[in-house]
């Protein structure tokens, strides 16, 4: 058996929702029409001319946003010098204070490719190369605008890019300059391939963040993205990142040069979204260099400052009974610090498979790279490991001290479905309420006795027995008390996932129907952490993640319900949590609660492997 510190495979990577932009675009169209004036400014950045959308009444007032963009001109033109074909797309700069597009600070949207870049060469469609105000706007505005406004639109140059800025969401001028530099990179990228403004691809956004840091040195307002990268990469492939992918480009410039960053940042439409294709941008041994740089914490900001956050190695115990297994998604750096038991053995067996793997002991001058299967002298603890799978496959590397295979070796790790407790053994959570009613019977006023008896009959008739230890009994109680409410679960039992590394989830999607109202929980996930103390599995529920829709009646448009409630423990969630002893078998596991309970009630959870 194996003791694993596992990063969930790709499907478990936390993601951000893409914006629902239909109505937001309509609102922006309305504002553009209301402003009704575009003009060419005197500012050009290299071959990219700047146009402005601004009310006529404000045209002669100081233009702070344009001034900030002008201050970036020398550095942006320096960045343009890295392009084999200098960028030439014109830019229309727009400010809006509308409450649209979520918390977006700015976005860039470009017309269909004109006569520049690879995308234009592939298009060959003259109609696509016509002037369009970012293809979303012109056709609608020309039909509604007065003749002067329509003429102004027709005067706009080919291949135009809109940069739309939300100034009220930006804290200071430094951040405004950073945002403008980031969006300018998108205007330069768009000459090489087309992209929707909400396609937040890792190489597009990560390289734009890098360029903005090069242009606006000392920026700290984006530190949160760097911290997020090191948190998310444990369970996410590099291809599943976005803005937070910027440390990869910081490292790339330091390991190679700025030309390499631009070559990746201009990498093409879609092929880099797939890990197996993205893996080809570096030789396998260079991917290991990327992992080692994180382990050694040698990556810096583009201006030479230390990163505001660094990758941290997770602890992993290697014992004589259990192998240590390091798992993760493709192109995801996994760092571990291995601890050894007392009286260890002189040799360490490593099976890296196809992964790039390096190990370093306390006394080692440098990292030792290991390919495939190998046996090495045991390094002095603490032992550091850096590993990455440079392909589209998941990482699975193993370390051992010799004989292993004990049946009690981390047997709780895995995904399980709980089986229902037999009805005669299930606890009735309403029994206490019935006892309370019996005690209160003599104190009920005569005029309230009918209501009292009706409540008693309903409670005695209710079948709200708790058949699952990892499913809350409250929905079942609700069904019985409200009669017209029905709860239907997607699965025969809750899915309990006990992950190596100490994380824990319960997945139990379901639908609640009552009258005209339906609540559909596609995701209903209590989560928390677990640990082993003195052979007892201790589970702490820390939060609840829900995602679904609510509808009410045929004319009611479904409403999204998405929330994450943190800070509540097992005491406030009926299912899950608590202390358990474990009994493992080949295909299942039985957990027995350590709490002293009613002897007639089952305190066991029977789980089968998923």
Image: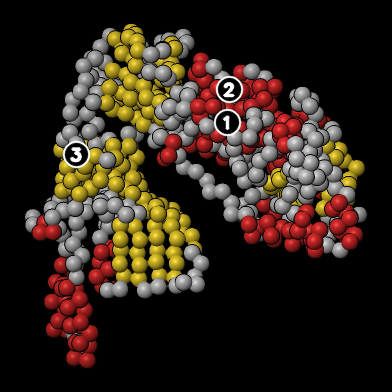
Please identify the quadrant where the C terminus is shown: top left
Q: Is residue 35 visible?
A: no
The reply to whether dot 2 and dot 1 touch (C-beta < 8 Å) is: yes
- The earlier-in-sequence mark between 2 and 1 is 1
Q: Which residue is mark 2?
A: 281
Please identify the quadrant where the N terminus is shown: top left
Measured Cα–Cα span from mark 3 to mark 2: 43 Å
Q: SS at mark 3? A: strand
Few, some or many residues within 10 Å of mark 1 (<14, 14–19, 20+): many
Residue 256 picture location, percent across and down:
64, 18
Outermost residue to the bottom: 447
Q: Which residue is mark 3?
A: 588
Measured Cα–Cα span from mark 1 to mark 3: 40 Å
Residue visible at 28% across and 9% down in the picture = 346
Q: Which residue is mark 1?
A: 272
Q: Quick check: 478 above or below 472?
A: below
Q: Write down the quadrant of residue 183 in the picture.
A: top right
Residue visible at 21% across and 42% down in the picture = 608
Residue 514 picture location, percent across and down:
35, 71
Q: Is residue 143 visible?
A: yes
Q: Quick check: 355 above or below 565?
A: above
């Amino acid at each position: 058996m194996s003791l694993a510190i596992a990063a969930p495979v790709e499907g478990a990577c936390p993601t951000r929702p893409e914006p629902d932009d239909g109505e937001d675009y309509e609102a922006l169209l309305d504002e553009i029409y209301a402003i009704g004036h575009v003009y060419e400014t005197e500012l050009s950045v290299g071959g990219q001319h700047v146009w402005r959308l601004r009310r006529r009444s404000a045209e002669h007032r100081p233009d702070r946003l344009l001034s900030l963009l002008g201050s970036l001109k020398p550095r942006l033109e320096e960045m343009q010098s890295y392009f084999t074909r200098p960028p030439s797309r014109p830019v229309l700069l727009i400010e809006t204070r509308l409450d649209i597009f979520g918390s977006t600070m700015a976005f860039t949207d470009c017309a269909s490719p004109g006569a520049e870049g690879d995308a234009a060469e592939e298009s060959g469609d003259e109609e696509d190369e016509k002037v369009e105000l970012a293809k979303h706007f012109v056709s609608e505005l020309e039909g509604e605008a007065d003749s002067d406004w329509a003429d102004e639109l027709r005067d706009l140059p080919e291949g135009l890019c809109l940069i739309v800025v939300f100034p009220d969401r930006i804290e200071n001028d430094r951040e405004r300059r950073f945002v403008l530099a980031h969006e300018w990179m998108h205007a330069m990228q768009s000459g090489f391939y087309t992209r929707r403004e909400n396609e937040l691809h890792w190489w597009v956004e990560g390289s734009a963040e890098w360029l903005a840091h090069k242009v606006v040195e000392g920026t700290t307002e984006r530190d949160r993205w760097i911290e997020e990268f090191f948190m998310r990469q444990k369970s996410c492939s590099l291809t599943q990142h976005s803005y937070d992918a910027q440390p990869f480009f910081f490292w790339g410039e330091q390991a190679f040069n700025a030309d390499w960053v631009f070559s990746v940042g201009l990498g093409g439409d879609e092929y880099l979204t797939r890990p197996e294709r993205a893996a080809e941008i570096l030789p396998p041994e260079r991917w290991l260099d990327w992992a080692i740089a994180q382990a050694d914490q040698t990556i810096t900001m583009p201006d030479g400052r230390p990163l505001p956050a660094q990758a941290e190695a997770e602890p992993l115990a290697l014992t004589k009974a259990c192998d240590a297994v390091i798992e993760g998604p493709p192109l995801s750096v996994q760092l571990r610090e291995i601890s050894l038991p007392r009286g260890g053995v002189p040799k360490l067996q490593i099976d890296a498979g196809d992964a790039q793997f390096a190990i370093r002991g306390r006394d080692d001058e440098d990292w030792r790279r290991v390919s495939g299967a190998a046996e090495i002298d045991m390094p002095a603890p603490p032992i550091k490991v850096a590993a990455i799978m440079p392909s589209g496959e998941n990482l699975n590397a193993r370390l051992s001290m010799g004989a292993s295979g004990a049946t009690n070796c981390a047997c709780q790790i895995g995904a399980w479905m709980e089986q229902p407790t037999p009805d005669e053994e299930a606890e009735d959570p309403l029994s206490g309420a019935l006892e309370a009613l019996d005690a209160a019977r003599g104190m009920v006023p005569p005029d309230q006795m009918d209501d009292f008896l009706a409540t008693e009959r309903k409670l005695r008739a209710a079948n709200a027995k708790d058949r699952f230890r990892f499913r809350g009994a409250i929905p079942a109680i609700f069904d019985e008390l409200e009669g017209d409410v029905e709860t239907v679960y997607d699965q025969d039992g809750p899915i309990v996932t006990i992950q190596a590394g100490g994380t824990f989830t319960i997945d139990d999607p379901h639908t609640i129907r009552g009258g005209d109202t339906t609540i559909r929980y596609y995701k209903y996930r209590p989560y928390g952490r677990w640990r082993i103390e003195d052979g007892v599995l201790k589970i702490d529920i820390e939060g609840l993640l829900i995602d679904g829709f609510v509808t009410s009646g045929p004319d009611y448009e479904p409403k999204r319900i998405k929330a994450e409630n943190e800070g509540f423990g097992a005491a406030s969630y009926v299912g899950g949590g608590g202390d358990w002893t474990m009994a493992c078998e080949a295909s299942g596991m039985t957990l027995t609660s350590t709490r002293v309970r009613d002897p007639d009630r089952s305190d066991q959870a029977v789980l089968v492997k998923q």
